[in-house]
Amino acid sequence: MSQQYVLKKENFNNFVEKVMADYDFIAPVKAKKNILRSKSLYQKISNPEDIFLDDHSYHTVKGFFNDPREKLFDFDGNKIINPVIELRQRVFFGLRKCDLNGIWHQDMVFLDNKHQCDPFYKARRDVSVLIGLHCNNGFEHCFCNSLDLRSDFHDLMFFDKNNDFIIEVGSDKGRKIIEIASDFLEQGDNLLTEEDRKIKNMGHELKTTNIKKFYHHEDWKTKGADKCLACGACNMLCPNCHCFTIEDDVDFSLKKGTRIRKPAPCQLKHFTRVAGDHIFRQDKTARFKHRIYHQLQYFQDRHDVQFCTGCGRCIAGCPARIDWIEIINNME
Amino acid sequence: MTTKQQLISESPYKPVLAKITEYVRETHDSFTIKLDWKIHHQPGQFVFCSLPGIGEAPISICSHSDEYIELNIREVGNVTKKLGQLKVGDELLVRGPYGRAYPMRDFEGNNIIIIGGGCGVAPLKGSIEFIEQYRNKFRDVSLFFGFRTPDDTLFRKRMDVWKEKFNMHVSFDKVAEPSKACYDGSQGFVTQKVNELVGDNTNTVVFICGPPIMIEKTSEILLNKGFKEEQIFVSAERLMYCGMGKCGRCMIHGRYTCLDGAVFRYDELKDYKDD
Ligand SMILES: Cc1cc2nc3c(=O)[nH]c(=O)nc-3n(C[C@H](O)[C@H](O)[C@H](O)COP(=O)(O)OP(=O)(O)OC[C@H]3O[C@@H](n4cnc5c(N)ncnc54)[C@H](O)[C@@H]3O)c2cc1C
Ligand code: FES
């Protein structure tokens, strides 16, 4: 049983301000205009009043861990200049179960010591404290109840209960935040019921994650790929998708430049293009299936962990409104 | 609160410099370079070569030595063409080695059949050199190579040596006359030679590397002859950017070509060749 603390909601802003004295505070804020179907975005805040917890954020936080234009190194001719990255201690507040599991999956890829730990990701991850917020209710497109996600991957976890936040501690990093803000916290015990830990009224349900048998099903094409615009929005919004390209940017001297890593969406045709213009997943159906099978089968086969976190952002953000959960639910 | 500047000095993406100590022009569009780069590696592994400002390309190691690395490169695009313009004494950036190697130790005491088509012969050269170094650990060794024309033959000097040591068969898709480089091989596809000469599959393993269609046809012939899928090892080529299971580009139905390949056992890939 992990330790529990009570933060009265009236003290929430004080808590945030206290933490903000020592950390950058990144939390969902209200988006200026409604972006597609969501009203919130993760941002560094300077005023606790800006925090907006009533919606599911449109983007995930993955861009805070891997820079969308990560500078792997600079070069001057054949001379390599080691990169410098700027780090500040920071707290992510309001991460949902799907977001937290997404970060855990990114950890599995980028902190994997067996196949080379990624120093950029690690450095940013080391300075980050993850504070989760339990969803009492689900959102329109999410379906995490249909998946097998971890509930213990966080530094602190907030539960919204009546006039209080009940806080559970998951790590030493979280404990440090508790110490910093102890003026506003009271220790407690057994403050949460089974019911409090459930996520109710979830908008969506995935009937099965065992899709191996559907690999040759024609619905992937007729109900999915035929409508797909191959824009890659699903990849960009996904908390898991991490594929990238490495390329060199050079200045006018053609000698000096930077080797850059940037995200690559597998729904784009050139994702598998090799020299000679051969494209392995030329067919849109093959690309559509690749993403979904990576989410539900490939990662599971490799790591024994489900990749998809059920956040539904790929459905909410799809300009063609493709609901792949419905496609699977109707397959036989 | 302060902003900390962290220098990233250790990074798996950071290559090292290597110098070209030998350069051999093999054909009109391919060359072999030897680098003064000392890394321990296994047959079947590959490295990334890069020229700053142009990019990186994964290239198989085509030698077997802890003292140096040889790479045979076909000039097909930006990086490979620029690499072709380098000369002895020039430097390039390299990192590696990557990939799962041929499990050579498991094959000790076996007959080995090596079948290469075109530039697919290059990655196999590493395993042939390995066999040369540990010759008494293996039984009969047969080499089957196919090139488009005699002018496309790779590693001519090595071939002269291998001809004496192993059962070697070279075939050319077509022999143009008159050809000054005419090598003593026969006309026809390498698959025909394999069909003609390969018989018994007992205690035998086969390595195949070449264009996808050649790999497919050759495997088909061998399977028809009674070879088991587990006896056949094939190479896969996919787009690669990292070599360490992170960029996701090389994935074939959930398998990373860079970690689980590029050498695969036939049964691991057979259903997903185009995926
Ligand atoms: C495991 C492995 C081993 C290989 N071994 C050899 C070898 O021994 N000799 C040889 O000549 N070729 C080899 N190749 C193919 C070689 O990597 C490509 O021909 C080369 O990357 C083309 O780069 P380019 O810049 O010249 O071509 P462009 O078409 O200009 O490519 C632009 C970029 O695309 C990428 N790219 C293009 N084609 C490929 C490809 N086939 N594989 C991976 N990335 C690609 C590169 O990152 C390159 O920077 C190998 C490929 C793999 C995956
Ligand atoms: S090359 Fe990046 S995952 Fe294989």
Image (cartoon, rainbow, N blue to C red):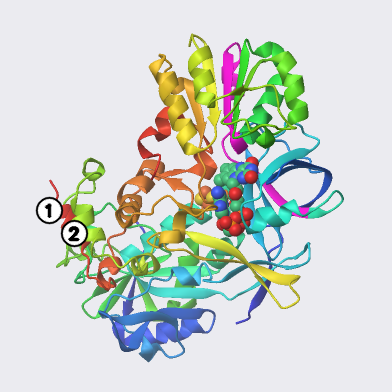
Nearer-N-terminus badge (1/2): 2
Which is closer to the viewer, label 1 or label 2?
2
Tell me the residue that label 1 is attached to: A330
Which is nearer the eye, A116 or B142?
Answer: B142
Residue A83, which numbered label? Answer: none
Chain letter for the residue marked with disc 2 in the picture = A
> Is residue A116 visible to the viewer in this orientation of the structure?
no
Callouts 1 and 2 close, C-beta under 8 Å: yes
Magenta span = B92-120
Where disc 2 sits, the SS reads helix
Task: Determine the residue located farthest toward the front in the rendered image.
Answer: B178
Q: Badge 2 local density, few (<14 within 10 Å), some, or many (20+)?
A: some
Is A74 left, or right, of B57 in this rendering?
right
Is B227 left, or right, of A141 in this rendering?
right
> Residue B166 at x, y = what percent?
68, 15
Is B197 left, or right, of A41 in this rendering?
right
> Residue B272 at x, y = what percent?
37, 39
Is A173 left, or right, of B74 in this rendering?
left
Residue A223, which numbered label? Answer: 2
Quarter of the N terminus of chain B within the rendering: bottom right
Where disc 1 sits, the SS reads loop
Of the residues shown, which amino acid type is indicated by label 2?
A: Lys
- Residue drawn at x 32%, y 50% as measured from the top left: A293
